[in-house]
Image (cartoon, rainbow, N blue to C red):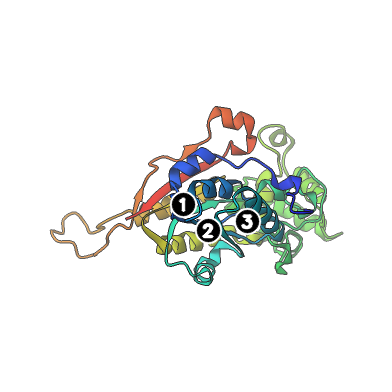
Amino acid sequence: MANGTLTPEYQHEPVMVAEVLEALRPEESSVIVDCTLGGAGHAVRLAREMGPEGQLIGIDQDDMALNSAAARLDREVPGVAHRLMKGNFRDLDELLCAAEVPGVDGFLFDLGVSSPQLDIPNRGFSYHEDAPLDMRMDPQSGGPSAADVVNGYSEAELIRILHAFGEERFAGAIAREIVRRRKTKPISTTTELVEVIKAAIPAAARRQGPHPARRSFQAIRIEVNHELDALLIGLQAALRWLNPAGRICVISYHSLEDRIVKRLFQSASRGCTCPPDIPVCVCGNVPILKVITKKPLVATTEEVERNPRSRSAKIRVAMKL
């Protein structure tokens, strides 16, 4: 980025913008938190609805995203107060305390790896590009990279993450092949890992369905960034910070994420859980949410044609009671 101009990687069209605006219904005095800021595609549209009385808080753990988003917000919605914070939404309590907001009217979670991260080869997220095996959302974190996972985990640990986070039916064969190959030489690039995965999967299975490395790359990325643990912690914190009638909107891209969101929303919207034969409630459980989307929203055919990355997106929305 130079002279406040967005890098090309951060100019992608955000997913299901109309649905997000309808879900969160920002008003002029709203406090909205975008927990996955990226290039501010959703944030700019939300800010336009809020006006000068509103406050936008954007959170991202990627320095490039924060820099690009700051430039875009300053240029496109200069009259709207915004504060951008580096961090993971697993630390939402600490971040919002630092932002000194009494409560929040709307939360947006746009999950998974962002388009810019996929499109910058040296980040190591894409199985279509040759790059170092990194996959960290925050490369400056110093935490373990994908290479550390691939070369350091035991065969049993690799099977666990490939099965649990990638729902990969060939998890055992892939893990065995990884362990076999790394005895000769560490697996250090995305291309090397793709070759290992392809060698482990039967030829007939490779010829049909999505890219043979898709599920494994997803699983390793989730493990590197502890995404599912962070999601549950972040959602629970968001429920604590929501004002009455405040809304939470979550865009997920695979079944593991969507399942966590669905179960949490169902649990928080449930009232008495006493057995039906007990005449008086003794559990004291009261709902704190109303689920707005009985079924998840999906992108229109027109949007999928225009923006293929919306194909797997699902939106769930709930409101604080």
The Cα atoms of the two marked residues, 1 and 2, are separated by 8 Å
Would you say residue 197 is visible in this rendering? no
Disc 3 residue type? Answer: Ile
Using the image as rendered, state which of residue 291 and residue 219 is in the foreground. 291
**Residue at 70 percent of width and 58 percent of height:** 67
Label 1 belongs to which residue? 261
User: On the rendered structure, is 163 left or right of 151?
Assistant: left
Q: Quadrant of the C terminus?
A: bottom left
- Could you say whether the residue bearing mark 1 is in a helix, strand or loop? helix
Disc 2 residue type? Answer: Leu
The Cα atoms of the two marked residues, 3 and 1, are separated by 16 Å
Q: Which mark is residue 222?
A: 3
- Could you say whether the residue bearing mark 2 is in a helix, strand or loop? helix
Q: Which mark is residue 231?
A: 2
Tag 1 and tag 2, C-beta contact below 8 Å: yes
- Could you say whether the residue bearing mark 3 is in a helix, strand or loop? helix
Q: Position of residue 121 (x, y in %)?
A: 79, 49
**Residue at 53 percent of width and 35 percent of height:** 299
Q: Nearer the viewer, mark 2 or mark 3?
A: 2
**Residue at 59 percent of width and 58 percent of height:** 227
Q: Which mark is residue 11?
A: none
Using the image as rendered, state which of residue 192 and residue 97 is in the foreground. 97
Q: Decide which of tag 1 and tag 2 comes sooner along the chain.
A: 2
Q: Is residue 16 above or below residue 234?
A: above
Q: Position of residue 106 (x, y in %)?
A: 45, 54
Disc 1 residue type? Answer: Val
